[in-house]
Amino acid sequence: QSALTQPASVSGSPGQSITISCTGTSSDVGGYNYVSWYQQHPGKAPKLIIFEVSNRPSGVPDRFSGSKSGNTASLTISGLQAEDEADYYCSSYTYNDLGVFGGGTKVTVL
Amino acid sequence: EVQLLESGGGLVQPGGSLRLSCVASGFTFNRYAMAWVRQAPGKGLEWVSSISPSGGTTYYADSVRGRFTISRDNSKNTLFLQMNSLGAEDTAIYYCAQEVWLQFYNWGQGALVTVSS
């Protein structure tokens, strides 16, 4: 099971928007709408911030949004804030019911 | 409020075994698939295993298939991971998670497993 491809790092200034990509194949990201995103602060457990490509759980700020085009999903953080500095991971349902994550993206707020 | 509490982590010698437990509360346990996800020190997340709500169907990553066994006791709202033939590559924090279509809605705080002589 090959990991999904994410950029290692993305940075932006407070108030700016950044986008993190997550590239898979037609057997995972491109084939299903069960793409999710997780935020992880140092020393903490991951937290679900986007499910089913573009849905936010209750309590997640609306500056977090998700989308998908073909085999690539994207997470956009609008109005970047200092507290958004964290690691972000994507995940997708796969054709053989096995889980897969992206390698993770470190977001730095300049 | 959903709570997942892992236990059973610790130091084990290479080739040894360990059993993790995860007690769930705040939701109807027997209606949800559950999963284990691990994170090696300084590394990313790795899906390890999933189990259906009834426990009748299980899935494993290639890296653990044949060595790890996932199970659940719905009468006790508890998820298990039996880990055998452990190697240094299994050193990680192991998280249990509530799962819906391989999306992980809620996570425990994690249990550290260290494989070392």
Image (cartoon, coloured by chain):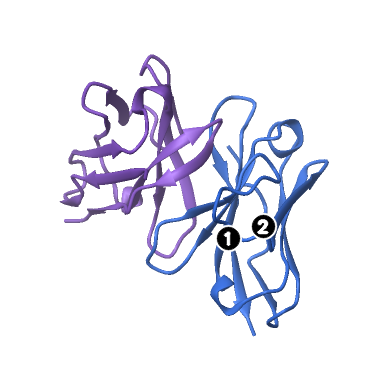
How much space separates mark 1 and mark 2, taking CA atoms?
A: 9 Å
| 1 and 2 marks on the same chain | yes
Q: Position of residue A25 (x, y in %)?
A: 74, 38
Dots 1 and 2: beta carbons under 8 Å? yes
The label number, if any, that marks residue A6 in the structure image: 2
Say the numbered circle drawn on residue B8: none
Q: Is residue B8 left or right of residue A53?
A: left
Q: Tell me the number on the disc at residue A88.
A: 1
Q: Quadrant of the N terminus of chain A?
A: top right
Q: Nearer the viewer, residue A88 or A104?
A: A88
Q: Is residue A34 left or right of residue B50?
A: right
Task: Identify the chain drawn in blue.
Answer: A
Amino acid carrying label 1: it is: Tyr
Please state which of residues A11 and B64 is positioned toward the viewer in this rendering. Answer: A11
Q: Colour of chain B?
A: purple
Subunit that carries the residue with mark 1: A
